Image (cartoon, helix red, strand yellow):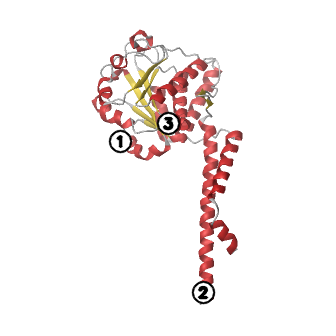
Amino acid sequence: MQAFVEKLQALDRRWIYLLLSLVLIVSLIVGKQVDPVVIPPVEQLYKIVDDTPTGPGEGKIIVLCTTFSASTLGENGNHAIALMRHCFLKKKRFAITAVGEAQGALLGRAIATQLAEQYGAEYGVDWIDFDFQLNTLAFYTSFPKDIPGTVRVDGVQGKPLTSYPIMQGIDTINDVALLIDITASNSVFSWLQYVQPNTKPRLKIGYACTGVMVAEAYPFLDSGQLVGMLPGLKGASDYEKLVDVIEEQELAAGNIPQRYEPIRVGGMQLNTARQLMFTQDKAHILIIAFIALGNIGLFIALRLRRRAGKERS
C-alpha cells in the first residue's frame, strides 16, 4: 500500500495532461448535445430580446457588440450565434459592431453573413454591419448622439449608413432598443459608465461574457444596470436550447427554409454550445476525479506515517 501511495503522490503530471487530452478529443468526436436547465439570467435576456420591438416598421434596432477575438470563439462565438439566430428567427432587426477589437468585427461579420444565408435574411434590411470602432471616449460620446454620423459607412459594402432601409429613423441611442456586449473583456463597463447614465429612458444593456468575467458582473445584474446575462459556455448552451425551440416552431410553420447548420469561421467549423458543454462536463469530471484521488492518496500517506511513528515509539 505504501509503495502504491508513494507512486500516486509522485505521478508525472504529463500523464494527467495526456489523459485529459484523450478525454477532450474523444468527447469532441463522439459527444452529444446536452439538455441544460436554463438559468434565470439567460431567461431574462432571452425574454427581453423576444419582447423588444425591433421588427420592420417599429423604428428600433438591437446592437450586438462582437468585441471578442478568436481565442474565445468557443464561448463568445456561440453567444453571438445564438443571439443572431434568435434575431433572424423572430425578425428582430440588428446591427453588429466591434469596439476596440478588430478581430471581433471580422468574426461577427462572418457569423452574421452565414446565418443570414441560412435563414434567408437580407443585408441592409434585416441586419447591418457597423464595422470596427475605436474604444475611445470620443466614440462613447458621439455614437449615442449621432449614429450615422459616427459610423458613417457600413462594414460590408462601404456605403453610407443612411442608404440602407434598416437605418431609416435610426439616428441616436434612443433608437437602440437593446445593446448586448459579447466580449471577453470589461468593455461592457464603458457602456455602463459613459452611455447608460446619459440616456432617457435608460439604455437596456445585456452581457454575454466568458466564464472568468461572470463574478464581477453579477452586482450590475442585481442592480438592474444589466438586463440579462449569458455567463460563459453555460449561458451560450442555455440560450441555444431556447432558440432551438423557436427554430422548430418556425420550421414547422414553413417560415424558414432549413434548420441551423454549424458554420465555419476562419476555416474551422464551430461545434454547437450544447455539444461543447458535453466535452466540458467530461473534462470537469476527470479533473474532479484527479483531485479526489490526490486527496485520498494524501490522507492514506498521513495515516501510514502516523502508524509508522507509533510503531517506532
SS type, badge 2: helix
- Nearer to us in this view, 268 or 281: 268
Residue 255 percent location from the top left of the image: 60, 17
- At 40% from the left edge and 41% from the top edge, which residue is drawn? 221
Give the farthest residue toward the top. Answer: 163
The residue closer to the viewer here, 124 or 89, is 124
Residue 223 has which mark?
A: 1
Which quarter of the rendered picture does the N terminus lie within? bottom right
Q: How crowded is mark 3: few (under 14 residues within 10 Å), some or many (20 or more)?
A: some
Question: Is the C-beta separation of discs 1 and 2 under 8 Å?
Answer: no
Mark 1 to mark 2 CA distance (whole Å)? 59 Å
> Residue at the location (70% across, 39% down)?
29
The mark nearer the N terminus, 3 or 1, is 3
Q: Mark 2 points at which residue?
A: 310
Q: Quadrant of residue 36?
A: top right
Gap in Å between the C-alphas at discs 3 and 1?
17 Å
Question: Which residue is at 33% across, 16% downward?
Answer: 149
The numbered dot on residue 43 is 3
Query: Given the image, on which type of amino acid does mark 1 rest?
Result: Ser
Q: What element carries label 1?
A: helix
Q: Residue at x 67, y 68 (%)?
A: 7
CA separation, marks 2 and 3?
A: 60 Å
Q: Is residue 12 left or right of residue 158?
A: right
